[in-house]
Image (cartoon, grey):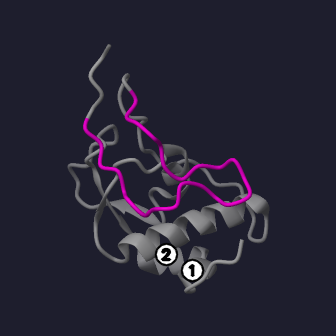
Amino acid sequence: MAKLADMTKHRGFPYAMPGTGIQFVIRRANPKGATPIKALPRHARPGSGAHRIDAAFLHALWHHFGAEPFERGNLDAARLNLLFGREVLPVDKDFDPVSYEALLVINEKVARQSFPESFVDVFEV
């Protein structure tokens, strides 16, 4: 059995979007390596279900980490990829997209413009 990579588990971070099968974190490291973090096009329009899921994930990121850099750890790559390069940025130019230890930070100005609902105290699902 292959040894799994070390991966920070963000205790207290919501596991998923309530009422959906959409996960926000993964349970264990991928034995084949971390899924690359890369910017993916986002087609969800404000008010759509997909937009609400992205907003809920950003809400969880903001209320868990705030403006501080955070480690990718067990955060779901599919969710990060929809925000990456816009609302979520690498901390430095030596960013490794396939590392569970990669540091990210919320681009607060862009995030507040794209998802103002993510910054309220309570996100209504």
Q: Is residue 90 left or right of residue 26?
A: left
- The residue lying at 68 percent from left, 60 percent from top is 18
Q: Residue furthest right?
A: 48
Vertical side of 17 occupied by 113: above or below: below
Please tell me which residue is depicted at 49% across the width and 49% down the height of the picture: 25
Instruction: Name the residue furthest top.
Output: 1
Q: Is residue 117 magenta?
A: no
Q: Classify residue 3 by image quadrant.
A: top left
Give the class, few, some or many, for how many residues have Cα within 10 Å of label 2's Cα (few <14, many ≥20): few
Q: Secondary structure at mark 2?
A: helix
**Start and end of the magenta stretch?**
6-30
Q: Amino acid at mark 2?
A: Val
Residue 17 drawn in magenta:
yes
Placement of 41 over or under 35, stated as above or below? below
Mark 2 and mark 1 residues within 8 Å of each other at the beta carbon: yes
16 lies above or below 100: below
Q: Position of residue 108 (x, y in %)?
A: 43, 78
Q: Residue at x 29, y 49 (%)?
A: 8
The quarter of the picture where residue 17 lies is bottom right
Q: Is residue 37 left or right of residue 124?
A: left
Q: Residue 110 got which mark?
A: 2
Q: Residue furthest front?
A: 12
Q: On the image, numbered disc 1 is attached to which residue? A: 113
Judged left or right of residue 89, residue 68 is: left
Q: In the depicted view, which residue is nearer to us: 82 or 76?
A: 76
Please indicate whether residue 125 sits to the left or right of residue 118 in the image.
Answer: right
* Residue located 25% across and 47% down the image: 101
Quadrant where the image shows the C terminus = bottom right
Q: Secondary structure at mark 1?
A: helix
